[in-house]
Image: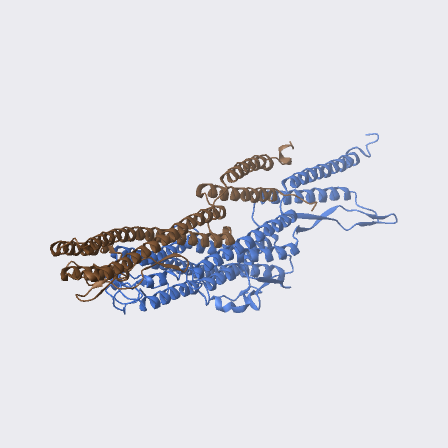
């Protein structure tokens, strides 16, 4: 419009433009101060949706890492206990071999029998291994000792203790004592304890012919222990792999979140100084523009 | 017919008077250069009726001021008010939605989404160590933070909705008093028009300022009447006609007639926050679903002591009253973490509660809700800034027509001052002529 430009128009346009520049400047300033591109959802609704999802993913990922750490520690305790119990089984095997040889008299066999009894107590001691106050070989009855000194019964259960190491990925981390350590009710038994008590009885009864069978049963119990250790070792490997995978995912998720949410400082600061220069130029031009009118030149 | 000797004196006098009036008008314009809504006026000159100088023809008799005209383009007024109406509508929405957004405090490390994330993680911690009272206590703490977070967001939304409703009342008062002022001015204008005179330009300006203001409040249509008044209507509802006002008592008086303007913007906000399917009901749906799902999972689990529990995890029904069951807080072992009886080391039920993370009706719905509010707010901001640009542009166009330009008034002053001086000079010439005629003529031989 080739028309009249009035003083109020000039003033309004100047103010509107200054306002626009100042608003932009203030938005940039907020970005610098908060370090964030998105300060309220309306800054970028799509980005907000992404940021919220990524934050939630990140929190979940860190939780899974904690779960993995927890499971690994549990595995370490289990492995140590099973290792010790395995050593006791080997020591028992040596004793049985020694007892089976003809050179041992009844007195020698009685001494061996009492050592076997000590070994059973030691096995039960190891089977009461704890991680953070919880009995790891007690199935899910982790709050009570699975074995007591007074008898050879198993007080735990055969249930699986599970941990979640990924979305809907649950792993069983425990070895129930009933499966490998076993129990003895006074006449019959299962597992290592069952074999050891049978050996003890045979020795005390002088039944040396049964010792051959006992030796085979002892080997089978030891194999079961080794198999359980191998399984626990494999699980440890799996947990280590999960841990490093979760760590990598955490890295990429954190980077994605930062890309979505964080202000690019270099760019923001350059924007800021550009906008400041524009603002100052606008102020200066405004001061010069508003002043003169024909009034200044008429006398 | 012979002409009067003094015709020239009369002509010059008319010139003097007319130029003086024009200078007065310029003075009035300059005085009102910064008056809001002032419309530049001009004195329109017209040559006075001529005298017959038979047989030569007509001889001019000078000039007179025909009228004082307002430089107003009513078409721009209509366009501008249409934009002011949109500006009022979107501005009201933007202001409210920005408050709503601040209530969420998202995305951040302390918003409700983060509280949700921590809540689910605590369930995992309980699953990892169901025997420990400490992890159960941490879970109950995080659950209380989450319940508190949801309640606080709801409180803030309710407070904003209350402010909006108060604002509706104030805006209706404002509407009524402004319409009342228009009606009062109309009565003055009507009495002048009834006596056959043109209405005062300055009264018309005042009325236009009031109508401009009304245009931002409601979707206004104005019709000029022959009696000088204007009829103001919102859709089919007549606010004022011929100087008599109909008051609006409440929003429902306008009903479906109201389609835009600040008042409609506030009504929209009220509906969007507190109405059916609004923000509050969405937030409540999230809380209700959280309470329902967690309690259902809790009911199928077993406590640390090994029994199935009758204690719900959350009490309450929606975001206004959600809270952690105080019985659990008193005895954290009652949290049902186990999936089977008498299994203190079993955390499968805790894991299945933790599996609700990201559920489309719980925190998934909450995220979608926050993002939805963000989109609404962004939309309102965009529309407001568009309307602002258009309002500015149209205001400038209107100012270009009706605003006072000091440059122009200065050059007019120069013009009319020169006109005045020249008329005075013509009068002096007449005077000298008459002096010659009266004082010196017929003195031959004296």
User: Whole-percent x and y of residue B91?
Assistant: 52, 55
Q: Residue furthest front?
A: A102
Q: Is residue A129 left or right of residue B28?
A: left
Q: Is residue A286 left or right of residue B51?
A: left
Q: Nearer the viewer, residue B184 or A61?
A: A61
Q: Is residue B257 left or right of residue A163?
A: right
Residue B373 visible in rendering = yes
In the figure, the shade used to draw chain B is blue
Q: Residue furthest left?
A: A107
The quarter of the displayed image where residue A118 is located: bottom left
User: Whole-percent x and y of residue A37?
Assistant: 49, 46
Which quadrant: the C terminus of chain B?
top right
Residue B148 visible in rendering = no
In the figure, the shade used to draw chain A is brown
Q: Residue furthest right?
A: B55
The quarter of the displayed image where residue B279 is located: bottom left
Q: Nearer the viewer, residue B328 or A146?
A: A146
User: Whole-percent x and y of residue B191?
Assistant: 59, 61
Say how the picture is coloured. Answer: by chain
The quarter of the displayed image where residue A204 is located: bottom left
Q: Is residue A70 left or right of residue B384?
A: left
User: Whole-percent x and y of residue B121?
Assistant: 36, 56
Task: Tally the marks.
Answer: 0
């Amino acid at each position: 419009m080739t028309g009249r430009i009035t003083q109020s128009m000039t003033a309004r346009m100047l103010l509107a433009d200054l306002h626009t520049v100042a608003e932009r400047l203030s938005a940039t300033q907020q970005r610098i101060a908060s370090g964030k591109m998105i300060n309220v959802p309306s800054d970028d609704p799509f980005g907000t949706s992404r940021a919220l999802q990524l934050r939630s993913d990140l929190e979940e990922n860190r939780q899974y890492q904690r779960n993995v750490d927890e499971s690994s520690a549990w595995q370490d305790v289990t492995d140590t206990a099973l290792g010790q119990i395995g050593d006791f089984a080997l020591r028992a095997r040596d004793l049985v071999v020694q007892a089976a040889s003809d050179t041992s008299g009844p007195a020698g066999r009685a001494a061996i029998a009492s050592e076997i009894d000590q070994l059973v107590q030691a096995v039960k001691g190891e089977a009461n291994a704890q991680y953070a106050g919880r009995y790891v070989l007690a199935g899910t009855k982790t709050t009570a000792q699975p074995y007591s000194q007074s008898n050879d019964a198993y007080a735990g259960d055969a249930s699986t203790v599970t941990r979640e190491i990924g979305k809907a990925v649950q792993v069983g981390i425990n070895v129930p004592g009933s499966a490998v350590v076993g129990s003895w009710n006074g006449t019959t038994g299962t597992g290592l304890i069952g074999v050891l008590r049978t050996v003890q009885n045979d020795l005390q009864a002088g039944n040396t012919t049964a010792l051959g069978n006992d030796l085979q049963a002892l080997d089978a119990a030891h194999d079961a222990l080794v198999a359980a250790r191998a399984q626990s070792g494999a699980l440890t490997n799996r947990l280590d792999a999960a841990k490093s995978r979760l760590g990598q995912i955490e890295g990429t998720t954190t980077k994605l979140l930062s890309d979505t949410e964080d202000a690019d400082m270099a760019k923001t600061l350059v924007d800021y100084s550009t906008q400041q220069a524009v603002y100052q130029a606008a102020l200066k031009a405004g001061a010069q523009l508003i002043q003169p009118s024909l009034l200044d030149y008429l006398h | 017919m012979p002409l009067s000797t003094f015709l020239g004196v009369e002509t010059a006098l008319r010139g003097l008077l007319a130029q003086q009036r024009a200078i007065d008008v310029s003075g009035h314009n300059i005085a009102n250069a910064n008056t809001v809504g002032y419309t530049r006026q001009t004195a329109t000159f017209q040559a006075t009726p001529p005298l017959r100088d038979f047989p030569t023809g007509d001889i001019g008799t000078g000039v007179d001021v025909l009228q004082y005209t307002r430089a107003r383009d009513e078409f721009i007024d209509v366009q501008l008010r249409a934009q002011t109406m949109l500006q009022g509508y979107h501005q009201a929405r933007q202001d409210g939605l920005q408050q709503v957004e601040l209530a969420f405090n998202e995305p951040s490390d302390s918003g409700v989404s983060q509280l949700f994330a921590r809540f689910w993680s605590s369930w995992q911690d309980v699953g990892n160590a169901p025997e420990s009272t400490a992890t159960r206590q941490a879970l109950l703490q995080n659950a209380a933070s989450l319940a508190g977070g949801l309640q606080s967001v709801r409180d803030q939304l309710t407070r904003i909705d209350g402010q909006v409703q108060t604002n509706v009342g104030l805006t209706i008062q404002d509407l009524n008093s402004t319409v009342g002022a228009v009606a009062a001015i109309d009565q003055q204008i009507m009495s002048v028009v009834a006596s056959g005179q043109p209405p005062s330009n300055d009264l018309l300006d005042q009325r236009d300022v009031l109508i401009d203001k009304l245009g931002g409040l409601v979707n206004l249509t104005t019709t000029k009447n022959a009696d000088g008044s204007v009829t103001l209507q919102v859709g089919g509802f007549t606010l004022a006609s011929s100087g008599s006002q109909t008051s609006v008592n409440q929003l429902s008086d306008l009903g479906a007639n109201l389609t835009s303007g600040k008042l409609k913007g506030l009504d929209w906000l009220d509906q969007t926050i507190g109405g059916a399917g609004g923000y509050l009901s969405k937030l409540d749906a999230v809380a209700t679903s959280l309470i329902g799902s967690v309690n259902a999972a809790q009911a199928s689990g077993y406590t640390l002591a090994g029994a199935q529990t009758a204690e719900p995890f959350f009490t309450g029904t929606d975001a206004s009253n959600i809270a952690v069951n105080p019985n659990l807080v008193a005895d954290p072992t009652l949290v049902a973490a186990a999936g089977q009886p008498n299994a203190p080391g079993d955390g499968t039920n805790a894991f299945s509660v933790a599996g609700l993370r990201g559920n489309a009706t719980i925190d998934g719905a909450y995220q979608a809700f926050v993002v939805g509010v963000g989109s609404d707010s962004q939309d309102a901001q965009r529309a407001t800034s568009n309307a602002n640009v258009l309002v500015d542009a149209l205001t400038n166009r209107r100012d270009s027509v009706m605003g006072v330009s000091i440059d122009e008034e200065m050059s007019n002053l120069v013009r009319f001052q020169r006109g005045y001086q020249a008329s005075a000079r013509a009068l002096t010439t007449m005077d000298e002529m008459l002096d010659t005629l009266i004082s010196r003529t017929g003195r031959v031989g004296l």
